[in-house]
Amino acid sequence: MNRLSDLLLTSLAPIIWGSSYIVTTQLLPNMDPLSISLLRALPAGILLLLLVRCLPKGIWIARMFVLGALNFSIFWAFLFFAAYRLPGGIAAILGALQPLIVILSARAILGHPIRPLSLLAILAGTCGIALLILTPEAKLDLLGVAAGLLGAASMAMGIVLSRKWQPPVSALTFTAWQLTAGGLLILPFMPFSSTDWATINTSNVIGLAYLGLIGAALTYVIWLRGIARLQPSSVSVLGFLSPVSATLLGWLILNETLDWLQLLGALIALASVFAAQYALRPKTAAKTAAV
């Protein structure tokens, strides 16, 4: 597959992640974030392990726990904490800073160059996300802001290290290892869960099955495959598609309002994705386009 095909396939992951908000609010209202995180990661990871029948060995065991923590355990913990302490718009804007952290981390860890146009595109995309979902009533909370930034930094480091640490296995196996490790790291904290397990119903099972099989297993296979084939910076910018997807799905399915400022924000966010991918294209492609 060429770069465009890889980008289109990888973009499916954040687009699908945009549906997580609807699934969580509509099908899992009686469950707490800790329980949802565990049941999203661990069963999916174990299922994939049964499919691939391959376990990490040696140094890869420690690395998978590091990646599982960065991409799942720590990231989800800070994400949910920020969501509880901040309005959704501010939490999403902080998350939108992730591509900037990825670019800086990729420069320090992988030696990837920093391209000015990509930075401008990311700043424009962050402004677009602000127009899309920020409300006038939004208020800042220092702990929430700190959690949002740490969550963005956690996943950003997970993206960069997932590129640096590429085991000689398929993306499916790589995903199985990370999901299982991330789930196991959440498991010791389950005594703090507030979910009343007597209230679990069919809707919960459907929602968890979707989040685990589609929103975690399938999407992270696609995501990690993209990280292996593309620059981490190119992959992280695709994350702007997630809030756009969430907003459009809320409008289509939940009849939420969508005004002209939100539409403008969505268009700016989409334009920033295209601009960033143009700026981050490989040098050989850039030279060919110039001929």
Image (cartoon, rainbow, N blue to C red):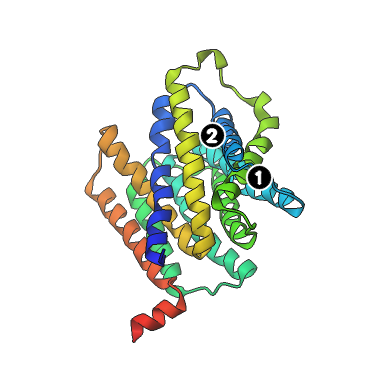
Crowdedness of circle 2 by 10 Å Cα count: few (<14), some, many (20+)?
A: many
Q: Position of residue 107 (x, y in %)?
A: 59, 70
| Residue 249 is at least partly visible in this image | yes
Instruction: Check the image and name the residue furthest to the left.
Output: 260
Please report the residue visible at 61 percent of the width from the left and 69 percent of the height from the top: 110
Q: Is residue 200 left or right of residue 286?
A: right
Q: Which residue is mark 1?
A: 54
- Viewer-proximal residue among 161 and 155: 161
Please report the residue visible at 37 percent of the width from the left and 82 percent of the height from the top: 288
Please report the residue visible at 56 percent of the width from the left and 41 percent of the height from the top: 76
- Viewer-proximal residue among 231 and 4: 4
| Residue 94 is at least partly visible in this image | no
Determine whether label 1 and label 2 are within 8 Å by CB. Answer: no
Q: Is residue 262 left or right of residue 119?
A: left
Picture quarter with the C terminus: bottom left
Q: Amino acid at mark 2?
A: Arg
Please report the residue visible at 59 percent of the width from the left and 64 percent of the height from the top: 105
Q: Is residue 19 above or below residue 261?
A: above
SS at mark 1? loop
Q: CA distance from mark 1 to mark 2?
A: 21 Å
Q: Position of residue 133 (x, y in %)?
A: 36, 45
Q: Which residue is mark 2?
A: 40
SS at mark 2? helix
Q: Is residue 129 left or right of residue 78?
A: left
Q: Position of residue 64 (x, y in %)?
A: 67, 49
Q: Is residue 255 above or below residue 97?
A: above
Q: Is residue 52 above or below residue 159?
A: above
Q: Amino acid at mark 1?
A: Cys
